[in-house]
Image (cartoon, helix red, strand yellow):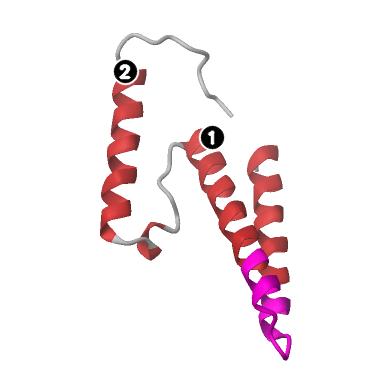
Amino acid sequence: MSKKIDAALKTLVKALEHHGEVMGDRPLSAKKAGRATERVRQAAAEYTLVVADKTGQPNPFVDFLDPETVRSLRGERDAIAAKKGTGSTGPSSSS
């Protein structure tokens, strides 16, 4: 596994575990819940970016997004792919 993917995965798992702990607290603190939720969202976003960068694979959480967001993300992905295909010769991604 790529070091970057492994690190992003560990961060995501840690954020999810913390989220589960916070959500199990009684009484539930709205402030703590909000922070824990944001941490999960940021970790998931970072994970999907690293996976896409390293593998070219789509967002594994795409089914949880609303259709408008999915269309927007696909448009951004296609624009990036088109830009890369217009003569930009960067280093190959062989990892």
Which secondary structure lies at badge 2?
A: loop
Query: Label 2, label 1: how many angstroms apart (C-alpha)?
Result: 17 Å
User: Where is mark 1, residue-wise?
Assistant: 54
Q: Which residue is mark 2?
A: 85
| Residue 28 on the magenta span | yes
Please provide the residue range marked out in magenta.
20-35
Horizontal side of 65 relative to 54 (left or right) equals left
Identify the secondary structure beneath mark 1. Answer: helix
Quarter occupied by residue 84: top left
Image x and y of residue 16, in percent: 65, 67
The one nearer the camera, 39 or 34, is 34
At 58% across and 46% down in the image, what residue appears? 46
Image side of residue 79 versus residue 11, left or right: left
Residue 68, percent across and down?
26, 54
The quarter holding residue 89 reads top left
Amino acid type, label 2 = Gly
Q: Answer whether residue 2 is visible to the viewer in this image.
A: no
Q: Which image quadrant is residue 73 in? A: top left
Quadrant in which the C terminus is drawn: top right
Q: Image height check: is 88 above or below 51?
A: above
Q: Give the class, few, some or many, for how many residues have Cα within 10 Å of label 1's Cα (few <14, many ≥20).
A: some
Which residue corresponds to the image point at 70% horizontal and 72% vertical from the top-left?
A: 32
Q: Earlier in the sequence, mark 2 or mark 1?
A: 1
Residue found 73% across the figure and 70% down from its top: 18
